[in-house]
Image (cartoon, grey):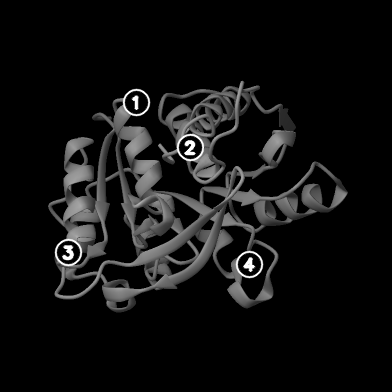
């Protein structure tokens, strides 16, 4: 097979720290794509931004990171923004201004472009979950971030597992509850399910074995936002390169540790 190609589709935003007069382009899939591009994987992004300074910044950042933005749409209006605040090392989401993201949808040309890739990143807020059956029919490997919403009935996570190859949950600790949840998700059709556990590492299930990986130590925690996205990117990089599950987890943990030691999520 030719060199693997990865694509992030759907939600993107700019995190704005007004009290710091600072912002950065982001989004779960955007962070994932940036990490993979830095690791040498061909990466693309299909999303929408506005015509404001934040939209221009998103396009400039992704282009500078070597990401294909030929199908990144720009619409009149405001780029989606998350207004953020600092609480020590924690980032607090104050409010979301959805902007042009409210109207995001895929064109036929987008679908054709997406089909030229091998791995696709989605999350519960990507606005294209109705296309999951088509993505699977195209032969794409679906990497999906369920974050902390994997067991929230409002998000209907159970409806999507049969279309997902690699599912990622965010939880607090390794206990019987999360083991039951990752095993149940895999029984619905995924190849592997991983729960990231913050400082408690991560746990994964592939239908045969339960894998445990500790968190990598860091000298100073500067920013916890983006740690999960970095982990998923590292894990995906391992999958692309044929690593076993344990090594994929370790690669994710290392990349996550790098992220939490700096301000930006990548």
Callout 1 secondary element: loop
Q: CA distance from mark 4 to mark 1?
A: 32 Å
Q: Residue at x 55, y 24 (%)?
A: 254
Return the x and y of residue 259 as percentages of the image width and height: 49, 33
Q: Which quadrant of the figure has residue 256?
A: top right
Return the x and y of residue 97 as percentages of the image width and height: 38, 73
The residue carrying pointer 3 sits among few (fewer than 14), some (14 to 19) or many (20 or more) residues within 10 Å by Cα, namely some
The residue carrying pointer 4 sits among few (fewer than 14), some (14 to 19) or many (20 or more) residues within 10 Å by Cα, namely some
Residue placed under numbered mark 1 in the picture: 39
Q: Residue at x 43, y 64 (%)?
A: 83
Callout 2 secondary element: helix
Return the x and y of residue 126 as percentages of the image width and height: 40, 65
Residue placed under numbered mark 4 in the picture: 158
Is residue 160 among what the camera can see? Answer: yes
15 vs 129: above or below = above
Residue placed under numbered mark 2 in the picture: 230
**Which comes before the other along the chain, label 2 or label 3?**
3
Q: Which quadrant of the figure has residue 101?
A: bottom left
Q: CA distance from mark 4 to mark 3?
A: 30 Å
């Amino acid at each position: 097979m030719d060199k693997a190609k990865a694509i992030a589709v759907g939600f993107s935003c700019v995190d704005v720290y007004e009290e710091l007069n600072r912002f950065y382009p982001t989004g779960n899939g955007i962070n994932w794509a940036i990490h993979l591009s830095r690791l040498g994987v061909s990466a693309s992004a299909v999303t929408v931004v506005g015509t404001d300074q934040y939209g221009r910044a998103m396009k400039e950042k992704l282009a500078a990171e070597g990401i294909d933005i030929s199908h990144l749409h720009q619409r009149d209006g405001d780029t989606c923004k998350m207004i953020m605040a600092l609480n020590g090392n924690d980032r607090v989401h104050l409010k979301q201004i959805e902007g042009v993201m409210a109207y995001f949808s895929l064109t036929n040309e987008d679908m054709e472009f997406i089909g030229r890739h091998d791995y696709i990143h989605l999350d519960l807020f990507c606005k294209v979950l109705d296309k999951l059956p088509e993505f699977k029919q195209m032969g794409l490997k679906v990497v999906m971030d369920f974050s902390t919403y994997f067991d929230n009935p409002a998000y209907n996570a159970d409806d999507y597992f049969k279309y997902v190859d690699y599912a990622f949950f965010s939880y607090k600790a390794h206990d019987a509850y999360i083991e039951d949840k990752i095993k149940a998700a895999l029984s619905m059709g995924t190849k592997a399910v991983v729960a990231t556990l913050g400082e408690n590492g991560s746990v994964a299930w592939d239908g045969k074995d339960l894998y445990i990986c500790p968190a990598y130590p860091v000298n100073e925690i500067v920013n916890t936002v983006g740690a999960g996205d970095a982990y998923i990117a590292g894990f995906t990089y391992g999958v692309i390169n044929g690593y076993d599950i344990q090594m994929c987890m370790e690669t994710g943990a290392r990349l996550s540790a790098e992220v939490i030691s700096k301000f930006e999520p990548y």
